[in-house]
Image: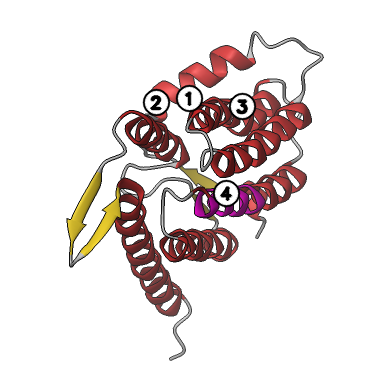
């Protein structure tokens, strides 16, 4: 069973609009720009976002740079596969492997920069990263075992997460809200990524249990 040929499950809130938009862009993109160029743009954008988060510890203008990088990352990361499909220039195994190696590097660098920014406690950023990587590993394994590539969970995909992050960056830049609770001060991203870490770990646990039960029943030993 090849993960490259697995059924893609994309049911996020913006999926229909995003798909039409990506196909429209891909059909008009200059021929000189190919999928590899877009993949490179995606990873460089996320590495730059991590550096910009780190820089925002000294100057909040870095948060605007992060937002620009997130938009650039969406353009490269979301469009590379669409361009390959529109032009019928697909390399399924290569594309699947490279995309996910790049994704793991990108999220690690992004959260590392955020942890150094002072906008979120490093422990909370670390927990979110661990949850994200655990869920990613589950998706990769399920793609092989079940021939189903799950892109979105509960109407959320990386696109919606980028938008939330952009909105959060704007809120930190203009408002920088702080909440007093349990005798301590908690910044916006302490709360946001704390809730996110709990949510993503719960999704990982639920999905892992569901798939384990499914595979057990499909391969039951009588």
Residue under the image location 59 percent in, 14 percent down: 25
Magenta span contains residue 31: no
Image quarter where the N terminus lies is bottom right
Q: Residues within 10 Å of mark 1 (few under 14, many from 20)?
A: some
Q: Which marked residue is nearer to the observer: mark 4 or mark 2?
A: 4
Mark 2 in CB contact with mark 1 (< 8 angstroms): yes
Residue farthest toward the front in the current orientation of the protein: 58
Residue indicated by mark 2: 16
Whole-angstrom CA distance, mark 4 to mark 3, is 25 Å
Residue farthest toward the right in the current orientation of the protein: 32
x and y, in percent, of residue 189 in the image: 35, 49
Q: Which marked residue is nearer to the observer: mark 3 or mark 2?
A: 3
Whole-angstrom CA distance, mark 3 to mark 2, is 14 Å
Q: Earlier in the sequence, mark 3 or mark 2?
A: 2
Residue indicated by mark 4: 113
Q: Earlier in the sequence, mark 4 or mark 1?
A: 1
Mark 4 in CB contact with mark 3 (< 8 angstroms): no
194 or 39: nearer the viewer = 194
128 or 138: nearer the viewer = 128
Residue indicated by mark 3: 79
Q: Dot 1 lies on which element?
A: helix
Q: Earlier in the sequence, mark 4 or mark 2?
A: 2
x and y, in percent, of residue 211 in the image: 42, 69
State the extent of the magenta-drawn residues as a range: 104-116
Q: Quadrant of residue 152?
A: top left
Residue under the image location 39 percent in, 26 percent down: 16
Q: Residues within 10 Å of mark 2 (few under 14, many from 20)?
A: few
Residue indicated by mark 1: 19
* Overall secondary structure of the magenta section: helix
């Amino acid at each position: 069973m090849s993960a490259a040929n697995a059924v893609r499950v994309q049911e996020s809130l913006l999926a229909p609009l995003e798909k039409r938009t990506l196909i429209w862009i891909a059909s008009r993109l200059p021929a000189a720009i190919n999928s590899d160029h877009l993949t490179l743009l995606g990873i460089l954008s996320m590495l730059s976002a991590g550096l910009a988060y780190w820089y925002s510890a000294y100057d909040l203008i870095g948060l605007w740079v992060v937002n620009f990088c997130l938009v650039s990352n969406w353009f490269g990361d979301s469009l590379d596969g669409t361009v390959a499909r529109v032009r019928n220039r697909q390399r399924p195994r290569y594309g699947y492997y490279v995309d996910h190696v790049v994704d793991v590097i990108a999220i690690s660098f992004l959260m590392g920069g955020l942890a150094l920014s002072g906008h979120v406690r490093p422990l909370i950023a670390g927990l979110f990263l661990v949850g994200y990587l655990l869920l990613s590993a589950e998706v990769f394994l399920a793609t092989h075992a079940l021939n189903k590539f799950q892109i979105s969970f509960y109407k959320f995909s990386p696109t919606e997460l980028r938008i939330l992050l952009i909105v959060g960056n704007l809120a930190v830049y203009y408002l920088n809200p702080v909440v007093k609770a349990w005798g301590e001060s908690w910044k916006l991203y302490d709360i946001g990524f704390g809730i996110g870490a709990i949510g993503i770990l719960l999704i990982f646990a639920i999905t892992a249990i569901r798939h384990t039960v499914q595979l057990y029943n499909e391969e039951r030993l009588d």
